[in-house]
Every structure is written in C-alpha cells, then in structure tokens.
Image (cartoon, rainbow, N blue to C red):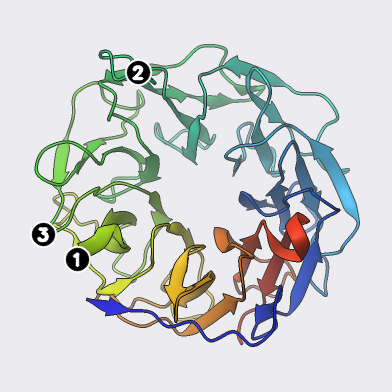
Amino acid sequence: MVTLALHATAAHAFAPAMDTTLTGNAGERLGYNLAAGDFDGDGYDDLAAGALSHVVVFEGSPTGLTSARAWTGGDWGELVALDANADGYDDLVVPTSSGIALYLGSPTGLSASAAWTYPVGAYPLLAAGDVNGDGYDDLVLADPQDMEYAGPLNLVLTFHGGASGLGASPARTLSGDWTFGYDVGVSDLDGDGYSDVVVANPFKGAGGNLWVYRGSASGTLAARSWTVNGPANYTDFGWELSGGGDLNGDGYEDVAVGLSGAGFDKHFALVRGGAAGPAAPSVNPLAFGQWIALAVIGDTAADGRDELVVGWQEAVYQNRERGGAGLFRSGTSTPSVPDLVVGSAGGDKAGSAVAGGDFDGDGAMDWAVGAWHAAGGAGSVGVNHAPR
C-alpha cells in the first residue's frame, strides 16, 4: 500500500494556492457538495455549492467563477446538474426539507421556484444521463428508505426527461436490501448510445459489487445486465461512484469506484467500459484515509481523454489531519500518482467534494474542490483552471 503525503504550509488555505477561492459566510459550511452546469446558457459553466442548509450558485465568466451569489435555494445534500428538457440550459436537482426538487435553467439562470419535486428518504444519491437515447437527460435516484437494515426497501428510481422536464413518476423502479443503492452512477459502458445505470452494493459478497442495468430505447432495463465484483483483498467496493466520462479515449465510458483497503483506508478503482460491457476493476495503490470523493470530469489537456478528480478530506500525514484533492490523467492504465495535488492544512476538510466544469469558457475543463470546514467553519471552494 502506498500512502499519499500532503504537504501544506499555511493553516486554513489551499496549498498550493488555487486560481480562484470562494469563501463562505460564518458557519455556512460552504463546499459540502458541488455540481457544475451552464444554468444561464452563456457558454461559461456555473458552480452549485452545497452548504449546511442551502445551495449557492456562482456564475462562470471569462475570468472564471465570480464571487457574487447568483442563486440560493434548496437544503443540505447531494446535487446533480442535467438538461432535463433539452432546451440548452442546464437544470439543477437539489435536496429540500421533504425530498428533492428540479430548478430549470434559463437565460437568467435557475428558476426561482421548483418545476418538479419528489419525496425521498433521508439522504438521496443522484446521477444523470440519457438512459433511453431520446436527447433529454434523465435522473437516477437512489432512495435509501431502509435505515434499520430490516428488509428489501432501498430503491433506485429512473425519471425520464422530456419537453417539460422530469416525469412525475419513475419510469423504472429497482429495489434491493439495505446495501442496494449505497451510491449510483451513470455511464454508457458498452457504447450503444444509451446510458447504463450502475448501482453500488458495497457490503454484498466478499467485498462488495456493482450491479449494472443497461439503457435501451425504452429506458433502464428491469433485469440486471452485468455484475462487477470487487477485487480480492479489498472491501466496500462501491463506497463512492462517478461515471459519464471516457478516461482512456477508447470510445467507451468508464466508472470510478471507491473502496477500502487495509485499515479501511480508501482507494479508488477504475472499471473500464468495452463492447462486451464493464471490465474487472483495476485498483489504484494510493491510500486516501477514511474518506474519498470522486468526479469524472471532461478533458483538461486536449488529449481526447477525460480526467478524474479525487478528494480525500481525512487523509492523515505526520499525525495531522490533512485533506486535499488530485487530478488524475489516466491514459490507458490506472494512474498511481496524481498530476496535480491540492492540499489543505489543519481540519479544513479540503476534498470533501470535487467537480469539474469549464468556468472560464476556454474549452478546457477546470476543477473545483470543496473545503467545508475552512475559515473556522465558513467553508470554501477552490478552483484550478486548465491547463495549469
């Protein structure tokens, strides 16, 4: 096992300094969750940043993200951007006090009121893609209703997009026991033009597995298409998922998967797509402490391959809690060391969330890192522009 060492020099700051840093208000905890999309259609991606009790949107510009708050709403929890009505403006799904809500994008940004709501359990997990190939983005929701390990109650729901947004009822409902749907991802693993739904079962079998349900012209199939078992000598395979990108440029989308190694230190593995579906996982040897966040983002280097950003808010180095994030340009094999590392000092929790977007509109993907406990709990979000 290789343990990643993070070298930070100043308290409550990204080190090295990031191109842009947005700081929250006192006690806000800005940077819990992140999602990027062009909500006003101006050609610059915007960033939605989750806080303790709400979500804030910062707009992109020719110089990157601006500090002005363009939109505030929702509650604490996971976020996802998608274009549910295919109008060219990205939309945002956010948590609310009673479930989740869809806010539609427009030339003036996100709508003031929700266009769609749905009641869910304690902490819904979200992903988006086009599972039926109709040009409208669809929402995949893991609804963890079974919090007492009592029976087959956990649900994974697919809502189809359309001209007016998301459908009122799920087009597909999948169910399983308490481990089913610990996280969800969306990737076109077999390259047929339909996004496949990847469901994490990190506590099943010897070390966890993924259940993959193929997309089709009618949507997500009811029967499981593939099972990807976790590698030997690791556990919790499926702790975290991120998909939707082609990390090695072979034309098939891949999935990044979090898992645990010795001492429950977190690692990530790559599950490559191919004509026959997903391949066996390839594990990165680096250990990232007790927490990992993953985001498959677009191409930062103009080499035809998407990249992976990994966050580790609780990595330990020299007996001090240090968080951080790294950009992995994967090429054709699982990368062992990140190209760029951003670490924080003290207990800033940098790497609690990561995301990618073209915030300055230069055609290359930038990447954002949340640090929800920076500045005494105000929280902050740092952004690096590509290339760097």
Q: Residue furthest front?
A: 319
Identify the element where label 3 is drawn. Answer: loop
Q: Quadrant of residue 305?
A: bottom left
Which residue is tagged 1?
A: 282
Q: Amino acid at mark 3?
A: Asn
Tell me where residue 215 appears, x and y as whole percent: 31, 34
Answer few, some or many: residues within 10 Å of disc 2's Cα (few below 14, many 20 plus, some between 14 and 19). Answer: few
Q: Is residue 94 visible?
A: yes
Q: Nearer the viewer, mark 2 or mark 3?
A: 2
Query: Which residue in the protein does label 3 denote?
Result: 233
Taking 66 as reference, is 380 left or right?
A: left
Q: Residue at x 33, y 27 (%)?
A: 220
Residue at image point 78% right, 46% down: 56
* Distance from Cα at disc 2 to Cα at disc 3: 28 Å
Foreground disc of the pair 2, 1: 2
Within-10-Å neighbours for mark 3: few <14, some 14–19, many 20+? few
Q: Amino acid at mark 1?
A: Ser
Tell me if residue 222 comes above or below residue 11 in the rendering.
above
Look at label 2 and name its amino acid.
Answer: Glu
Q: Quadrant of the C terminus?
A: bottom right
Q: Earlier in the sequence, mark 3 or mark 1?
A: 3
Which residue is at the front of the view, 201 or 11? 11
Horizontal side of residue 103 vs 354, given as left or right: right
Identify whether 241 is placed above or below 320.
Answer: above
Residue bearing mark 2: 148
Q: Position of residue 126 (x, y in %)?
A: 50, 36
Specify the quadrant of the image occupied by residue 337. bottom left
